[in-house]
Image: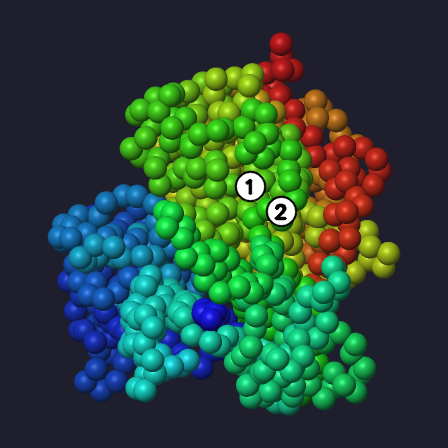
């Protein structure tokens, strides 16, 4: 008699930007409109005036005003309890008086997290800098100013982490007026979907426990996060023993104004002949059926855990049929497992010691493969269904979007293509990272246990790219729970000269792992690998795998394809805004990048740009600049003048590099300063030479670029100002329809993928290497 163990995978897939049926709620903490007096603290005293302004019979609201000679003046609110808030937002009405002899000063907004009330304003980095695009004139009356106040909604002040908080404003300009300011946080509403119920939760809650609906079988309490924007995150998958497989997916967010979308499933199993596939046959049953599905889930019965399968989900509508689309939007997942003979004999009894049942180990491998394969299927369907971008206008009824077919395959640990530095390669680390650090110094252990990943948990695959500071490999990280995660692994070849260098690098890596911003690559961890020629190990930087590659490759592919593609200005501006937002976050964390360029910005699944490659980044602990002490190779043509001449790096030198990166984006990946040798660059910059506007570059956009290249770092804008300026330029352009951008993006990704296999993108098509890294400082070398 045989005992067969079977299973069910319940996969709950909820909206991840593709479907928003539940809108965020707003919970008000403070509103000036509900008060008649504020009682806030002005410093110096009397420089901020508060007065009541009538808005209706018997109704007045407080107004704050700071007018007079140019000087720094601040006003501090009273202490407020945060209650359930995790992330604070602000609405404010404001106006500024124009400045005659100086640029318009920003209204700076501060958020202070504190358990007890503060009595005085504390100088520090502001959380928001606000400007008015059209300030009022000096001759305007108060009534005219009040009638034309500028309303700014849902401004992000940041997380609130203590028992309470206080806000403050400071202003150095001639005159500013504030009214109707409101502080609030968002909340995810109560939601009932996929047989689960979650009560309302404050935005920013990492993990919220829900419950199963009545009459639903409880396997484990469902959990999901409430995002900062008040939108629920995805549900987690749950696994238990039963006899069915349930697969769910999300529909496309943008249906093109039609409601006739249908799905079909295809199932293939491995044939007896090696390498051949055949239909699953009548033994595998789909409930309710596998074709012409209106629902987004099926139950599959009859899968054999000792066979390999391919499951494919296709989405189509009547327009697809009329247009003769041969490859509708689809996603395919292949499930592979370790081969084992089908059991044919009954149980055998023995008097020797107990042995592990082979059924248990092989079934475990099968279940792990199905879990990972189905999760990957979920990610691909979400990506294809969302038509690449989240925030786009709905398509009109006659517009259709054809998505490229997507194929995805999951293979086991040993199926990854072997790279040149595997665990058993010469010079590799036979011990865990913590054991290696014990040999180098026990003081590294306590603070770095959360950062280091055992070298044996990391398998290197094919090389994805090679640069001056190391190579990048495709990798597979295996967690302690046995879950495989696809990662990118960067090897570091420079900058680690002493044990102190290694310790500083690992401490900075620990901080970098806590980066939490949508436009910054999040460090997954660090592994250490021995090298024969040095007693110090080589750090292996583990990053998320970004399948679309870097931004420069994408831009060059669209420019040098057989038919060069038009790139909408709106898309290029969004690339710049993403990079500036990521850099603003890094600078707010005290990090200098020092190697910002299009080649070091990665494209995510949703085509958001993420700042990456922190090989040269530095944490500033006690000052606002970093001076390079060791002569290493630097990206000369992206460096600021003060970095070239004196090896001094600040956030404003990163702004210079951002200006060059903007030039790269507009020129579609061209190399800066063509025809200029690196040793000539500093003299030319000192004489006033700057990059010329690329072809078809908007004059306003070029002025933003040029402002980043001021010889005086203090005159360059900061990244927060750049985000606001670029967003204003984007708002002046027509809204780009989703179908237009989706077509360009799909073509661009295809071209970039093809170019990756045939082009050396470090070489410009003139044949000359342009992305040069040379020893720095140039000025020092020149004067020797």
Residue holding disc 2: 416
Residue 714 horizontal/vertical position (percent) = 47, 37
**Residue at 23% over, 45% down:** 122
Q: Is residue 417 above or below residue 143?
A: above
Front-most of residues 561 and 567 = 561
Q: Report which residue position mark 1 lands on.
A: 459
Furthest toward the top, the residue is: 784
66 versus 658 height, above or below? below
Looking at marks 2 and 1 on the same chain, the residue that comes earlier in the sequence is marked by: 2
- SS at badge 1: strand
Residue 313: % across, % down: 63, 75
Residue 317 at what x, y percent from top left? 69, 85
Marks 2 and 1 sit apart, C-alpha to C-alpha, by 8 Å
Q: Which quadrant, please, contains the C terminus?
A: top right
Image quadrant of residue 618?
Answer: top left
Seen in the picture, residue 196 relative to 648 is either above or below; the reply is below
Determine contact: label 2, label 1, CB under 8 Å: yes
- Please give left or right for residue 478 compared with residue 92 in the image: right
């Amino acid at each position: 008699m045989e005992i067969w163990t079977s299973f069910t995978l319940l996969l709950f897939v909820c909206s991840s930007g593709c479907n928003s049926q539940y809108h965020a709620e707003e919970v008000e903490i403070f509103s000036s409109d509900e008060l008649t007096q504020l009682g806030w603290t002005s410093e110096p005293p009397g420089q901020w005036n508060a007065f009541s302004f009538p808005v209706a019979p018997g109704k007045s609201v407080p107004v704050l005003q700071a007018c007079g000679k140019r000087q720094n003046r601040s006003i501090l609110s009273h202490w407020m309890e945060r209650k359930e808030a995790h992330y604070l937002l602000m609405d404010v009405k404001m106006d500024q008086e124009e400045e005659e002899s100086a640029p318009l000063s920003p209204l700076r907004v501060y958020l202070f997290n504190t358990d007890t009330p503060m009595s005085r304003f504390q100088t520090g980095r502001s959380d928001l800098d606000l400007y008015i695009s059209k300030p009022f004139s000096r001759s305007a009356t108060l009534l005219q100013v009040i009638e034309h106040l500028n309303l700014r909604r849902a401004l992000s002040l940041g997380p609130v982490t203590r028992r309470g908080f206080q806000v403050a404003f400071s202003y150095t300009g001639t005159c500013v007026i504030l009214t109707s300011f409101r502080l609030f946080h968002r909340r995810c509403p109560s939601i009932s979907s996929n047989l689960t119920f979650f009560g309302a939760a404050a935005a920013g809650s990492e993990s919220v426990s829900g419950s199963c609906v009545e009459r639903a079988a409880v396997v484990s309490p469902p959990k999901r996060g409430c995002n900062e924007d008040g939108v629920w995150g995805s549900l987690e998958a749950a696994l238990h023993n039963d006899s069915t497989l349930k697969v769910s997916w999300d529909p496309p967010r943008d249906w093109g104004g039609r409601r006739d979308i249908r799905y079909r499933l295809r199932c293939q199993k491995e044939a007896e002949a090696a390498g051949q596939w055949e239909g699953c046959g009548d033994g595998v049953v789909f409930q309710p059926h596998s074709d012409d599905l209106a629902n987004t889930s099926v139950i599959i019965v009859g899968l054999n855990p000792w066979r390999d399968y391919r499951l494919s989900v296709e989405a189509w509508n009547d327009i697809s049929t009329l247009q003769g689309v041969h490859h509708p939007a689809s996603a395919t997942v292949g499930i592979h497992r370790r081969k084992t003979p089908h059991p044919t004999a009954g149980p055998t009894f023995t008097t020797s010691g107990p042995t592990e049942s082979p059924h248990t180990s092989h079934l475990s491998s099968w279940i792990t493969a199905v879990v990972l394969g189905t999760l990957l299927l979920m990610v691909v369907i979400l990506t294809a269904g969302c038509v690449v971008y989240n925030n786009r206008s709905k398509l009109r009824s006659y517009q259709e979007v054809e998505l490229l077919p997507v194929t995805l395959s999951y293979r086991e640990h040993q199926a990854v293509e072997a790279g040149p530095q595997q665990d058993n390669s010469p010079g590799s680390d036979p011990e865990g990272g913590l054991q290696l650090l014990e040999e180098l110094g026990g003081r590294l252990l306590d603070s770095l246990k959360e950062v280091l990943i055992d070298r044996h948990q990391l398998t290197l695959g094919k090389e994805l790219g090679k640069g001056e500071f190391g190579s990048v490999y495709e990798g597979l990280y295996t967690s302690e729970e046995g879950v495989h995660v696809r990662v990118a692994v960067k090897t570091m070849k420079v900058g680690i000269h002493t044990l102190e260098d290694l310790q500083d690098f690992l401490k900075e890596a620990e901080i970098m792992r806590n980066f939490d911003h949508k436009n910054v690559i999040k460090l997954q961890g660090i592994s250490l690998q021995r090298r024969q020629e040095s007693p110090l190990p080589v750090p292996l930087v583990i990053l998320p795998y970004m399948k679309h590659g870097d931004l420069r490759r994408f831009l060059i592919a669209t420019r040098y394809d057989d038919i060069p593609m038009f790139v909408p200005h709106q898309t290029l501006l969004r690339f710049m805004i993403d990079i500036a937002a990521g850099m603003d976050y890094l600078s707010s964390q005290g990090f200098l990048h020092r190697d910002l360029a299009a080649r070091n910005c990665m494209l995510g699944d949703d085509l958001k740009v993420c700042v990456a490659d922190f090989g040269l980044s530095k944490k500033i602990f006690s000052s606002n600049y970093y001076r390079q002490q060791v002569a290493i190779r630097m990206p000369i043509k992206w460096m600021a003048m003060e970095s070239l001449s004196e090896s001094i790096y600040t956030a404003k030198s990163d702004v210079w590099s951002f200006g060059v990166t903007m030039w790269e984006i507009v020129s579609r990946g061209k190399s800066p300063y063509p025809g200029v040798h690196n040793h000539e660059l500093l003299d030319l910059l000192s004489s006033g030479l700057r990059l010329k506007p690329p072809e078809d570059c908007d004059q306003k956009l070029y002025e933003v670029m040029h402002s980043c290249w001021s010889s005086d770092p203090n005159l360059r804008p900061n990244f927060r100002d750049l985000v606001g300026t670029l967003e204003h330029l984007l708002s002046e352009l027509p809204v780009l329809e989703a179908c237009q951008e989706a077509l360009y993006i799909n073509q661009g990704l295809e071209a970039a993928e093809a170019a990756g296999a045939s082009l050396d993108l470090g070489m410009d098509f003139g044949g000359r290497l342009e992305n040069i890294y040379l020893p720095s400082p140039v000025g020092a070398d020149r004067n020797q």
